[in-house]
Image (cartoon, rainbow, N blue to C red):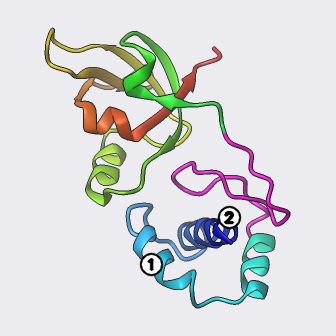
Amino acid sequence: YALVMVRRHRLIETFLVETLGYRWDEVHEEAEQLEHAVSDLMVERIDDVLGRPRRDPHGDPIPAADGTVTVPDARRLTDVGAEGRFVVERISDTDPAMLQFFESQGIGVGATLVVAAGAPFSDALEVRSGEVGSPTLLGRSATDALYVSADPT
């Protein structure tokens, strides 16, 4: 039952963003309401119209109708170290203000992050989205919200 509800929620979030033009920071609460109101038929139609997406706008895996889930191999940015290039696989959607901040910094699902250590004892990382732009200092609450994998390039 829990997997069915997760599927409904994430498909609705994706539908709201891709079809109705919601921003990714607006959809969580809306999906919370709708997931209890839509029928199984509507969920399947949404899945079909969207082309059976594997991940929602925040990068969270969407369970397939048969219950299988493909989870990206990702770790919190906090846990991967202070140097390197990483690809954002998923972003926690619990704080809409943080999602807005990430968007303003060019940080989204699929973005490449160039990461360096922040100031000693600051518990921060210096993060740049892509190869251009100015770096942003991210504290632990932000780095805990970003799930990344190693950049294959």
| Residue type at numbered disc 1 | Glu
Q: Quadrant of residue 114?
A: top left
> Is 150 within the magenta?
no
- Mark 2 or mark 1, whichever is nearer to me: 2
Question: Residue 28: where, in percent of width, then height?
Answer: 44, 68
Question: Residue 55: where, in percent of width, then height?
Answer: 65, 53
Give the residue at x 57% y 48%: 59
Q: Are marks 2 and 1 in contact (CB under 8 Å)?
A: no
Give the residue at x 55% y 73%: 16
Q: Report which residue position mark 2 lands on.
A: 3
Give the residue at x 74% y 45%: 70
Tell me the number on the disc at residue 129. Answer: none
Tell which circle, 2 or 1, labels the residue nearer the N-terminal end.
Answer: 2
Q: Secondary structure at mark 1?
A: helix
| 102 horizontally vs 14: left or right | left
Question: Residue 42: where, in percent of width, then height?
Answer: 73, 86
Q: Report which residue position mark 1 lands on.
A: 30
Q: Quadrant of residue 67?
A: bottom right
Bounds of the magenta span?
50-71
| Residue type at numbered disc 2 | Leu
| 17 horizontally vs 140: left or right | right
